[in-house]
Image (tube, rainbow, N blue to C red):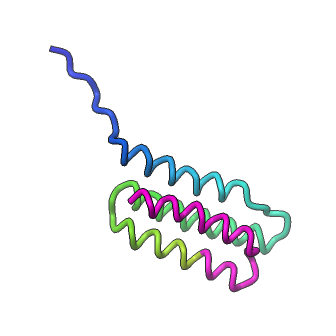
Amino acid sequence: SVTLPSLPSVRDAVLRAAVAGVDSTLASLSTDDREQRRAVEALQKSWQRAGADIVAGKKPQDAVAGFRDDIDKQQQAGRLGVLEAEALRLAVGAVAAAL
């Protein structure tokens, strides 16, 4: 008998695509000045942890909430513009909807 590898569920595939959408959004953000670069780097590190927890099912709601807080902090500190913050929130919203 042949054993075929199992395919990911549709839910897992959608979740992984949504997580990749946040990665793409972060990669598209401007890093023209030092403050923007610092904000993007901090958010990339934060998302690396949060995304891994989300995909692994380790308190995914908490990971989404924590990352949203990090977006807010960067925007409130003036290192992330309104449009950039909203783009990230939209991408993270897709992740939350896929949970």
Q: Is residue 26 inside the magenta stretch?
A: no
Name the residue: 85% across, 64% down. Answer: 32
Q: Is residue 78 inside the magenta stretch?
A: yes
Compared across the picture, whether 95 is left or right of 39 comes to left
Compared across the picture, whether 38 is left or right of 57 comes to right
**Image quadrant for the N terminus?**
top left
Residue 79, compared with residue 31, is above or below; it is below
Name the residue: 26% across, 23% down. Answer: 4
Residue 71, compared with residue 27, is above or below; it is below
**Magenta stretch bounds:** 71-99
Q: Nearer the viewer, residue 17 or 32?
A: 17
Compared across the picture, whether 74 is left or right of 67 comes to right
Question: Can you give x and y, in whole percent of width and height, for residue 63 in the image?
Answer: 43, 69
> In the orientation shown, which residue stands out farthest toward the right?
32
Name the residue: 35% across, 55% down. Answer: 56
**Residue 5, picture quadrant:** top left
